[in-house]
Amino acid sequence: MPEEKGLSNTTVVFMIVVALFFDALQALLTFIFMGWLVGIFAGLTFYVWFKMHGLNFATPKRAATFGAGFIIEIIPFLSALPAWTLAIVILTLDSKLKKFAPGLDIMKK
């Protein structure tokens, strides 16, 4: 039985919940200047997680969205912002919309 690529609804929910957890943990650790460590771990986690489900970061829009979330989360005090949650919501919605409505692009210029 071939494994289907793409994000299921359950995976999307889990990704958003994990992003919220990482953002909350990072906000707490920002005040002792350890938030950047959570940001690096979160970035690697989501990169591998998306790759496991076949999401390609070769497109400039996806790379920019993921990269912006990563950069914001490693800058002290800016890392208290929920950038991972926003980036993951945008990337998962973009992936789901392209599957159901191939002509629709929420990340259009």
Image: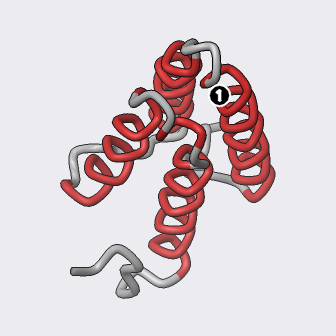
Q: Split into 4 quadrants, where in the image is the C terminus?
A: bottom left
Question: Which image quarter: residue 54?
Answer: top left
For this orientation, the residue located farthest to the front is: 31
Q: Position of residue 29 (x, y in %)?
A: 67, 20
Q: Residue at x 35, y 87 (%)?
A: 103
Q: Position of residue 56 (x, y in %)?
A: 34, 44
Q: Nearer the viewer, residue 87 or 60?
A: 87
Q: Is 105 positioned to the left or the right of 24 in the image?
A: left
Q: Residue at x 78, y 44 (%)?
A: 17
Q: Which residue is mark 1?
A: 26
Q: Position of residue 88 (x, y in %)?
A: 56, 51
Q: Split into 4 quadrants, where in the image is the N terminus?
A: top right
Q: How is colour applied across the structure in the image?
A: secondary structure
Q: Is 17 positioned to the left or the right of 52 in the image?
A: right
Q: Position of residue 9 (x, y in %)?
A: 75, 58
Q: Residue at x 34, y 73 (%)?
A: 107
Count of numbered tags: 1
Residue type indicated by callout 1: Gln
Secondary structure category for the residue under label 1: helix
Q: Nearer the viewer, residue 78 or 98?
A: 78
Q: Residues within 10 Å of mark 1 (few under 14, many from 20)?
A: many
Q: Residue at x 49, y 53 (%)?
A: 87
Q: Is 24 positioned to the left or the right of 65 in the image?
A: right
**Position of 51 relative to 54 (above/below):** above
**Position of 67 relative to 97 (above/below):** above
